[in-house]
Amino acid sequence: PAKKTVPVIGASMEASGEEFAAMIGELKRAEGELVLRVVVPLRETAEEGSVEMLGKYVADAVKRCKGTLRAIALVPELPANGRWNDNLIKTYRAYYLAAAEAMRNADKTMVLLGAGNALQTMNLVPQQRNGTSGELEHGVDAFGITDAAWELALVKRMAAAEKKPIWLLPALPGERNSSSTPAAGLAEGLRFVALPPANVDRGATAHLLGGAVMFQRVKPDGVAYVAVFQGDGYAVAALAGLGAGTPTDVAFPQLAQGRAEVEGLARESKAEKPTLVVADDATSMRVVDFAGNSVDCRLGDELRVPVDNRVMYLLQEGNAEDLSALLRTAEQSRIPTFEPSVTVGQETEGKATLQVRLRNLSPGELEGKLVVYVMDEGKAVEIARESFVPVGAGKSLEMPVVISRALAVGAEVVLEIEAGKQRQRCAVRVAR
């Protein structure tokens, strides 16, 4: 159209000007701050005047927020069925530079968070020379990410090299918003960690961790993610397992992505879930879930705390050092004891083989049996069975396994590993 109007902040919330002003007033009284995430629809070439319009939108947003706007991320939105190309990247960078200039002119204390997640910031945000070192670095004040697992792993070294903090933002609409992400972000020492909306966790994260200080991670090389915090007169541990959106998923990618399942060999224990078994003779501890609901997991003088893809909180009066010491002695139950990987092996006497690597994650030596399956029309078909020699704690075993049918790179196999008192199954892709 010949006449264009600049949209105002709050329009996407379907809030009137009066409602938005009232929200800002409440925010100022609470001494709170806003992070604005602007989603920019992209085309091969920017519409005439749209770059300048975005700059005006940002300047107007800063003004209307009356000192409460702390940071901005500019999130690109591809056209339907679109893929990145040089023209789209050029368009995005024009918008980004316009928004950055408008923000700086309006308030030089504000923080520019890039494209709102790690991968897009790394690939799209223009780089610039550092005025002191002369090194190329990304045009951000801080790296905005939306999870404390893979995105954090992507930017952690880069942020350290560029001496820039990392901010943990809520997931974008349509993305998985892990309940464990805020606790993991705080445990990893990120500068800013967004709390889940109250309708997600009923305020439990803010209540338990809002005034707490990170003390330490317990068994940081273990499969269970355990982070202990010191609160005012109490200690709280955030516990999570594989697939919970913590750095553990990065440390054990095959297990996190391979849908690892573990069952006890004793018939009566097969239904038990992954747990940490914590001694509590004095019945001084309690467990709540991510939404603050009480979790009844006591069995005699032990707590069997579930550790799966959602965070659990273990609370105790007193100091974090005592709770950490207790968790160091906690036993793992139904938690994977081996991390497997599979590559195509050399032919042996004309027969196809796989090269299987098993890394022992348990605190003790283990030996056992390995069975390899492929799925054929929905049924598991056994293609190999081998026993393996004892593997020391933290050690790895490389073993060639003769298989009854050849497999291509990228094929999926299911490994069944029986060792100790449990049986573990995990889907693994065959690598080169």
Image: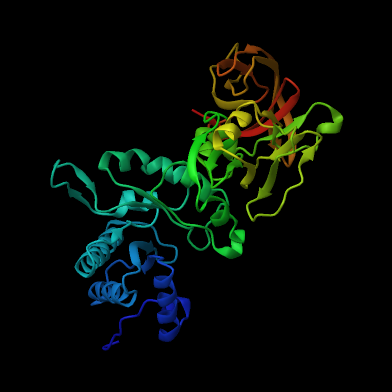
Q: Position of residue 231 (x, y in %)?
A: 54, 46
- Counting every numbered tag in the picture gives 0
Q: Is residue 243 above or below residue 264?
A: below
Q: Residue at x 51, y 50 (%)?
A: 182
Q: Write the residue at 27% across / 43% down.
A: 163
**Colour treatment of the image:** rainbow
Q: Quadrant of residue 124?
A: bottom left
Residue pictured at 57% horizontal, 56% vertical: 207
- Residue furthest to the right: 268
Q: Quadrant of residue 340?
A: top right
Q: Position of residue 80 (x, y in %)?
A: 44, 66
Q: Position of residue 203 (x, y in %)?
A: 58, 60
Quarter of the image holding residue 275? Answer: top right
Question: Can residue 251 be seen in the rendering of this structure?
Answer: yes
State whether residue 176 appears in this view: no
Q: Quadrant of the N terminus?
A: bottom left
Establish if 224 lies above or below 85: above
For the residue pair 154 and 124, the one nearer the viewer reads as 154
Residue 206 pos. (x, y %): 54, 56
Q: Nearer the viewer, residue 408 or 36?
A: 36
